[in-house]
Structures are given as C-alpha cells and as structure tokens.
C-alpha cells in the first residue's frame, strides 16, 4: 500500500486522505481471471454487508481499477490513488499473487480475500496500522487467514469519516 504518498491526517491518525470522496463508488476488474474477480467481489461484499453505509459496485466502465499479477516486489497489495478529492479521485489496486502464494501456504484463498478487502479499505479512507488495540482489517499484523472482513473498529471508522 502506498500510503506514504499522501497519508496526511486529520484529528485521527487512522484517516487516509487517498480515499474516495464518498463510500459509494464502482471499481473495474482489469486483466484477471474468474478466481481473482471472485476475490474482488468477496471484498466488495465484505464491505457492502458490514453495516458501514458502503456501496462498492463492479462496473466495466468504472475508472477505479483492480488487478492482480505476479510482481517482483514484496508487498501483498498496493493501493494507488490519483486525481483530486472530491473532484476526480480514482485509484488502482494491485494484488501480488507471487508474494501471497509464497507466504500464505495452504491459506492462499483466505489471504487473497483479506488483502483485497484491506485494499478496498484504503478507498474508504482507512490508513494502515491504525493506532488502536482493537481488531482491525487494516493492521498489517492481522491474521490474514481469519481476518478477512472489516472488524467493528473498521466499520466505526468508516462511519466516522463519511
């Protein structure tokens, strides 16, 4: 995740200013097979059903994109925003299948779902590693095999932001 490229804070250090201007937006799947489209759809549903007032759709004409590939870098997922909020903010999410398959062992599906849902959290203005002791999907230290959905803390933060 590229939060260092613009992760300014408001009063709460867990806010990420690279997010979308609204919790309702669409994303397009680009160059991925049905398995990865399924991970994207699961991540969208995880947020849409979390009770945070979120509506993430998947549309073929969306400007925001999601893709996966085997990248040489060591990250699991990378969220890159562009444009100005609120006028023309879009994002690109890349998920690194090479690093996930290297580290996930037999839990590749779970880690992929967790990573996809985490990266969509950045589009909802959530920062990495929030300053809380509560469980959070946004913590890098989470158990990716079991934490695949937004936790109560994540939901409350999205509601607070929007």
Image (tube, rainbow, N blue to C red):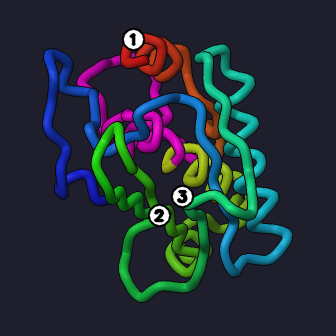
Instruction: Name the chief secondary structure element in magenta.
Output: loop
Q: Which mark is residue 16?
A: none
Residue 101: percent from the left, percent from the top?
61, 74
Q: Counting other residues with Cα less than 10 Å from the Cα at mark 2, is it few (<14), some (14-19), or many (20 or more)?
A: some
Q: Which residues are magenta?
A: 120-144
137 relative to 69 in the view: left or right: left
Per the model, the C-alpha gap separating discs 3 and 2 is: 6 Å
Residue ID for mark 3 = 64
Residue ID for mark 1 = 160
Q: Nearer the viewer, residue 157 or 104?
A: 157
Residue ID for mark 2 = 92
Marks 3 and 2: which is nearer the front?
Answer: 3
16 relative to 49 in the view: left or right: left
Q: What residue is shown at x 70% (from left), y 59% (from top)?
A: 107
Q: Are marks 3 and 2 in contact (CB under 8 Å)?
A: yes
Q: Counting other residues with Cα less than 10 Å from the Cα at mark 3, is it few (<14), some (14-19), or many (20 or more)?
A: many
Q: Counting other residues with Cα less than 10 Å from the Cα at mark 1, is it few (<14), some (14-19), or many (20 or more)?
A: few
Q: How many marks?
A: 3
Task: Name the residue at the right extreme.
Answer: 34
Q: Please check the rendered image and state whether residue 105 is part of the magenta-colored stretch, yes or no.
A: no
Q: With respect to residue 15, does 33 lie above or below?
A: below
Q: Please check the rendered image and state whether residue 125 is part of the magenta-colored stretch, yes or no.
A: yes
């Amino acid at each position: 995740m590229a939060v260092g490229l613009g992760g300014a804070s408001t009063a709460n250090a867990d806010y990420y200013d690279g997010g979308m201007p609204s919790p309702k937006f669409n994303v397009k799947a680009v160059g991925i097979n049905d398995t990865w489209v399924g991970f994207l759809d699961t991540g969208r549903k995880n947020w849409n059903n979390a009770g945070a007032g979120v509506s993430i759709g998947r549309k073929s004409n969306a400007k925001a994109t999601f893709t996966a590939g085997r990248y040489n870098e060591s990250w699991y997922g990378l969220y890159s925003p562009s444009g100005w909020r609120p006028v023309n903010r879009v994002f690109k999410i890349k998920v690194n299948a090479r690093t996930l398959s290297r580290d996930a062992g037999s839990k590749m599906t779970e880690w992929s779902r967790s990573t996809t849902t985490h990266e969509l959290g950045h589009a909802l203005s959530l920062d990495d590693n929030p300053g809380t002791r509560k469980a959070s999907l946004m913590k890098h230290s989470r158990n990716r095999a079991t934490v695949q959905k937004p936790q109560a803390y994540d939901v409350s933060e999205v509601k607070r932001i929007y």
